[in-house]
Amino acid sequence: MNVEPIPLRPNTKRQENERIILKAAEKVFAEAGYGGATMQLIADVAGRPKANIHYYFQTKEQLYRRVVDRIFKIWLQAADAFDGAKGPAEGIGAYIDAKMEISRKHPHGSKVWASEVMHGAPIIQDYLEVKLVEWTKDRAEAIQNWIDQGLMDPISPRHLLYMLWATTQHYADFGHQVETLNGGAPLTDAQWQEAKASVKMIVLKGIGVPR
Amino acid sequence: MNVEPIPLRPNTKRQENERIILKAAEKVFAEAGYGGATMQLIADVAGRPKANIHYYFQTKEQLYRRVVDRIFKIWLQAADAFDGAKGPAEGIGAYIDAKMEISRKHPHGSKVWASEVMHGAPIIQDYLEVKLVEWTKDRAEAIQNWIDQGLMDPISPRHLLYMLWATTQHYADFGHQVETLNGGAPLTDAQWQEAKASVKMIVLKGIGVPR
DNA sequence: CATAGTTTTGACCATATGGTCAGGAAACCC
DNA sequence: GGGTTTCCTGACCATATGGTCAAAACTATG
């Protein structure tokens, strides 16, 4: 007579299985989009029958939401690089490094997030309206402070943030295009370093931060 | 006994109907992704029964390919701004303007392209491998020439191009996010101008082009 | 008006999809 | 070992989807 099949007290087995499924789901959602992803395919990638996926995640949407949740947390974590910095050179430089690292290590997640936003954020609109608005406001103010202190040129903080997001995430979201233009091979370590350095150099010089 | 229902000689009625359907399809593909888009929804948006869509475009994939075709042509056209420029200030500045204008006028198309590439370009991989590779090579060489002539800093042409693409397309692909962060309202004319000016200012200064 | 070509669409079909469920297998606990 | 909870999954279902088709309606033209 158990109406709620999900136990309140999570045990280790459950956590481990959810982890495996979430990883598979992230990959499939990234490669096929929400609409194109099928529970069957996620099950195949996770190496277990479809009904098992539904045992841990009742609906496709719930599973998707959990995937997006995870991405958003990682995304926000990169903000730590921003905070506590003494000036734009340190803060923005570290932020670029952090976001480039995310693009490299979590390309699937980045794509899922991009897809979600591109399609109007049907699932995570509340995140955008609350957490992201707040996050952006805080960082824009920090940048404005740096401007007021004469540490950088008076540019629009918001458009600078957009440029940082766009440029760093490009290496994940458009990774396939970058790879194709790289002769079909993934970027090497050295090429990632070059990418990071290029972005930092152009942006920091572009906003008038001395090196 | 006509095996091929599509006539070789296109008449005006056909062209007009295809135009209407392509427009509807672009919107639906952009908002739902290839997998999430349904022929029924495209038909509804185009204001005609589903069978009529299938009369003009035999399969979903054919319709999709036609949509992507159109985007890619527009995308390449922006290159005209690049060519014939005397230096980076003119060439890159005009290119940014052109691409920002595309983001503003064809946000759906930009999203379809982004989705396609993000999912591994299953349909248009041949475009990437031939036309885009060629296009990129030419422009990278042009940039390298400018560098060699001392007209700009010695940065990696490829990473500069990626930054230009990412930044300009962000306003289309992530338009929903930008709008949400703008208090839920689309960018005004003035805000678009500010966006363009910010991007141009940061990039041009960032690559050492005097203004 | 007759004929040929083109366009339109309601009804239909095979398949794929998200989701359910009953019943069995483990795992855990006293 | 007995009882309870958690885990697992093959079989199944209702629905949605891409696509087909034949017959009707429309159009152009001689």
Image (tube, coloured by chain):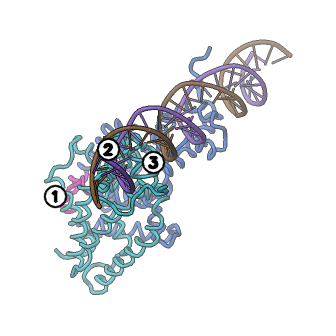
Chain colours: A blue, B cyan, C purple, D brown
The answer to whether residue A158 is magenta is yes
Identify the chain of the residue marked 2, using the numbered disc in the image.
B
Task: Give the Cα separation between the discs numbered 3 and 1.
Answer: 30 Å
Graded by Cα atoms within 10 Å as few (under 14), some (14 to 19) or many (20 or more), the crowding at tag 3 reads many
Quadrant in the rendering for residue A194: bottom left
Q: Are marks 2 and 1 on the same chain?
A: yes
- Quarter of the image with the N terminus of chain A in it: top right
User: Mark 2 and 1 residues: CB-CB less than 8 Å, in contact?
Assistant: no
Graded by Cα atoms within 10 Å as few (under 14), some (14 to 19) or many (20 or more), the crowding at tag 1 reads some
Q: Residue D4: give x, y in percent of width and height.
A: 69, 15
Horizontally, residue B141 falls left or right of residue D17, namely left
Q: Amino acid at mark 2?
A: Ala
Task: Give the Cα separation between the discs numbered 2 and 1.
Answer: 33 Å
Horizontally, residue A38 falls left or right of residue B178, namely right
| In the rendered image, the vertical position of residue D10 relative to residue A144, given as above or below | above
Task: Give the Cα separation between the discs numbered 2 and 3.
Answer: 29 Å
Nearer-N-terminus badge (2/1)? 2
Residue B46 image label: 2
Q: Residue A99: give x, y in percent of width and height.
A: 41, 56
- What segment carries the magenta color? A141-159
Q: Nearer the viewer, residue A163 or D22?
A: D22
| In the rendered image, the vertical position of residue B209 relative to residue A145, given as above or below | below
Residue beneath label 3, please? A112
The residue at the far bottom in this view is B149
Q: Amino acid at mark 1?
A: Gln
- Quarter of the image with the C terminus of chain A in it: bottom left
Residue sitting at x 27%, y 68%: B78
Residue beneath label 1, please? B193
